[in-house]
Amino acid sequence: MFSVSFDDNYQINSKIEGQFAPFLKENGKLPSFSVCFYPLNDADITELSVIETIGDYTYYKDSQNTYWLSFCGCYAKLGADYISADVYMSDKVKNDGSYEASYLLMQAYMYRLVSTGNFMIHSAAAVYKDNGILFCGLSGAGKSTQANLWKKYLHCSILNYDKPCVINDDGKIYAHGSPWSGKEKLIKNEYVPLKAIVYVVQAQKNSVRKLSPAEAMSHIFLHNYVYPLTEETEKQYLAAIQAVAEKVDIYELSCDVSENAVETLYNEIFDITYKEAKEEYKMKYKTKDCFLMKQIADEFIVIPRGSEALEFKGSVVFNEAGAFLWDKMNEFIDEEALAAALMEHYGIDSDLAAKDTKAFLKKMEDNGLVDKSED
């Protein structure tokens, strides 16, 4: 559970409050973290000694042997056991300071995670049938692209697009949402058992290989660098990633951007084949209750009812075959069953029935006339 507060002399940043809002309740597994924001005064940082500068981050120690971080002119003072952070915001930040505050807090929270046997991992987290799959890799490798392909072809959801956490809860490993999810801003305080970690490499041919625990540990370490403030920090981080490398299957996926890339990985991870999984899943459709159909001469028009009539501005007309399919959608029914009914009723071949059914459903969806259900 996160706790976010603001000093009386610091103007509240609503974006930061919104970013952490889902994590202010105890419904997840993330270790607790307390943050308070203050305006930066030069006196706050006069006694800081630089330890190391890496990129935009600088690490410090003060006269009390307390560790500090800075990012883009703002500072964070880390509390004991990294359970808290006091954040000092410069008045020279651009806009409202949410960018600087967010990245500074992300780095501070990494140490809280590591100190509790967990870590944050640069990846896109997909959820398929309550199984978490983390797509990792170098910037531009296609992490989000592969996660979105799973969303497209297997109808999975996305937990986080950039910085999910890996949580070790008494030996059970989970993928967990975090307040940091990249430009998509998909902020979810949710978690699922972690099924696999997948390192994505762009290639013209799709292939996958399982990594040994040593290879897996090396990949995690190199792709998720945590600066070791102390020897203890380094030991804790290595122990955390070793525990995951030994308990979770970790793969390297060489892939293009296609459904075959999804199929290649799926067949390696799960017991049933991709083909069987696709056959198991069917989208079902039902006409929304707020619409009815009325015949005018040899055409059939859609009439909205109730409050829907105020919003519905289109004019949707179907032929006799469309009216027939409409009548079949009083209850949820899948596309294949609709096509079979059309083929039998009109005595047409399967290809034409499938084509006409697909066109009908597209027209229904484009005009907001249909409810959908995943089966």
Image: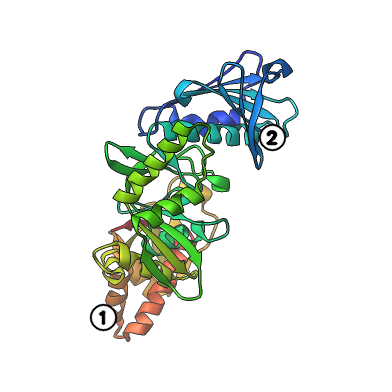
Seen at 39% across and 38% down, the residue is 118
Q: CA distance from mark 2 to mark 1?
A: 68 Å
Most foreground residue, 283 or 38: 38
Q: Residue 359 in the image: state x and y as whole percent.
A: 44, 73
Q: Quadrant of residue 281?
A: bottom left
- Residue ranking furthest to the left: 271
Q: Nearer the viewer, residue 23 or 170?
A: 170
Residue 133 located left or right of residue 72: left
- The quarter of the picture where the N terminus appears is top left
Helix, strand or loop status at disc 1: helix
Q: Position of residue 302 (x, y in %)?
A: 44, 61
Contact flag, marks 2 and 1 (Cβ < 8 Å): no
Q: Residue at x 42, y 31 (%)?
A: 115
Secondary structure of the residue carrying tag 2 is loop
Placement of the C terminus among the 4 image quadrants = bottom left
Q: Which residue is mark 2?
A: 72
Quarter location, residue 261: bottom left
Amino acid type, residue under disc 2 in the picture: Cys
Q: Residues within 10 Å of mark 2 (few under 14, many from 20)?
A: some
Which residue carries the number 1 mark? 344
Q: What's the residue type where badge 1 is placed?
A: Glu
From this view, report whether residue 26 is shown above or below residue 156: above
Q: Mark yes or no: residue 327 visible.
A: no
N-terminal label among 2 and 1: 2
Which residue lies most toward the front here?
Answer: 231
Nearer to me, 251 or 258: 251
Residue 63 in the image: above or below residue 22: above
Q: Considering depth in this image, is 130 or 306 the residue closer to the camera? A: 130
